[in-house]
């Protein structure tokens, strides 16, 4: 498999670099991490700038290879991440582009790409744990609407979101993959209560969401009724396959900064630490190659990442934690200073073996779908 760049990709890279060199110095200061209304305004203003410059649809209407170039170059340049709208841009938007009707694509994609509307993800539930198929939130059809009752947890940016990609149970089964439906729920609908959850780092980007007979138009269903598990697998393939690509680049930059800090404070003399940093350098180089492989596979199979995304997500989530454990060794007592960006990133890294499917779930996917091992009982 050829992992090199084509002439089209290099032309896109050069054009994007030139635009970033002009656009980034004009950005205002970034708001504090705990102020999500201000972060929403900052992130959506950047998304509008990308849209106006012709880069808005890179996540939904560009070949996977160009999407990867975009993620690489924006991270290398220190551009803002997708931030408050990562669900819309990296999960819901690509899912709607792949599975939505023409009317749904027309209604939702442009507001996502312009930064006009923010999405959150209503998948996880308090009693389901890592078993997404054990969800209990119920949607009952009533005329042209579904009436939804239940609750969700770990709903990223729910307090600033306009829409929610919501999984509900519409079939007679109470557990399992059958009878699940994917809905787009407006977050201003009556009956929705959002309760923010504060993290170790002091921010509140997660929330509990309580749904009390919330009416969602049936026209907001993506895919057929009771076919939501298949649609969800497409959503998760984007989440695990390409959504973390920019973060691999960020980790490689962090590793370089970490090596410089170790030289400055004398920790570089520790041969065990040097070997540790060298292994992490090789690890993230290999993960970047795996991202390229997954993108090449997606390009060959219609643009949707495959199960290789689970291999990547499994290893990346652990490598990220190892990186910030190494950062703690380099920083020493400063590793407990929440004013240090590495400290906040280290606390955030603890969630990566849970978010987007736990490591246990990823191992099951690798075992069953890639290695062909029998399912556990």
Image (spheres, rainbow, N blue to C red):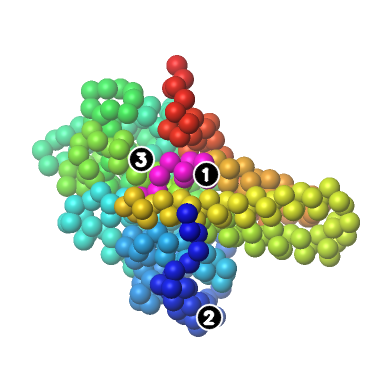
Dot 2 or dot 1, earlier in sequence: 2
Q: In terms of sequence position, does the residue under pointer 3 or pointer 1 come before the other?
A: 3
- Write the start and end of the magenta stretch as one range: 304-313
Q: Nearer the viewer, residue 158 or 11?
A: 11
Tag 2 residue: 21
Q: Main secondary structure of the magenta part?
A: helix
Residue 233 circle label: 3
Q: Judge whether residue 38 can be spotted in this image.
A: no
Is 332 placed left or right of 41 in the picture? Answer: right
The residue drawn where x is 53% and y is 80% is 21
Identity of the residue furthest to the front in this view: 1
Viewport quadrant of the C terminus: top left
Q: Secondary structure at mark 1?
A: helix
Q: CA distance from mark 2 to mark 3?
A: 37 Å
Q: What residue would you read off at disc 1?
A: 313
SS category of the residue bearing label 2: helix
Image height of 19 relative to 158, above or below:
below
């Amino acid at each position: 498999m050829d992992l090199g760049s084509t002439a089209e990709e290099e032309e896109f890279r050069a054009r994007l670099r030139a635009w970033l060199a002009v656009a980034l110095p004009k950005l205002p200061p970034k708001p504090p991490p705990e102020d999500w209304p201000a972060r929403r305004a900052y992130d959506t203003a950047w998304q509008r700038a990308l849209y106006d410059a012709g880069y808005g649809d890179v996540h939904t209407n560009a070949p996977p290879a160009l999407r990867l170039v975009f993620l690489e170059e924006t991270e290398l340049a220190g551009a803002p991440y997708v931030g408050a709208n990562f669900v819309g841009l990296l999960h819901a938007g690509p899912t709607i582009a792949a599975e939505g009707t023409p009317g749904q694509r027309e209604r939702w994609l442009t507001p996502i790409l312009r930064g006009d509307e923010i999405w959150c993800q209503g998948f996880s539930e308090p009693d389901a744990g890592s078993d997404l198929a054990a969800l209990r939130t119920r949607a009952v059809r009533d005329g042209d609407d579904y009436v939804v009752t239940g609750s969700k947890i770990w709903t990223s940016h729910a307090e600033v979101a306009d829409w929610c990609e919501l999984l509900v149970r519409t079939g007679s089964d109470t557990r399992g993959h059958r009878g699940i439906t994917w809905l787009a729920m407006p977050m201003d609908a009556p009956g929705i209560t959002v309760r923010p959850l504060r993290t170790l780092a002091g921010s509140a980007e997660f929330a509990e969401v309580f749904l009390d007979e919330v009416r969602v138009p049936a026209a907001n269903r993506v895919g057929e009724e009771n076919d939501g598990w298949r649609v969800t697998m497409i959503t998760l393939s984007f989440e695990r396959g390409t959504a973390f690509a920019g973060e691999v680049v960020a980790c490689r930059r962090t590793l370089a900064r970490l090596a410089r800090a170790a030289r400055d404070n004398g920790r570089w003399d520790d041969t065990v630490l040097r070997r540790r940093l060298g292994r992490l350098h090789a690890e993230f180089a290999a993960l970047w190659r795996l991202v390229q492989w997954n993108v090449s596979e997606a390009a060959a199979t219609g643009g949707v990442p495959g199960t290789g995304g689970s291999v990547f997500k499994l290893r990346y989530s652990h490598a990220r934690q190892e990186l910030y454990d190494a950062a703690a060794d380099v920083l020493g007592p400063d590793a407990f200073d929440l004013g240090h960006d590495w400290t906040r990133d280290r606390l955030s890294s603890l969630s990566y073996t849970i978010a987007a499917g736990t490591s246990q779930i990823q191992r099951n996917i690798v075992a069953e779908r890639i290695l062909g091992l029998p399912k556990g009982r």
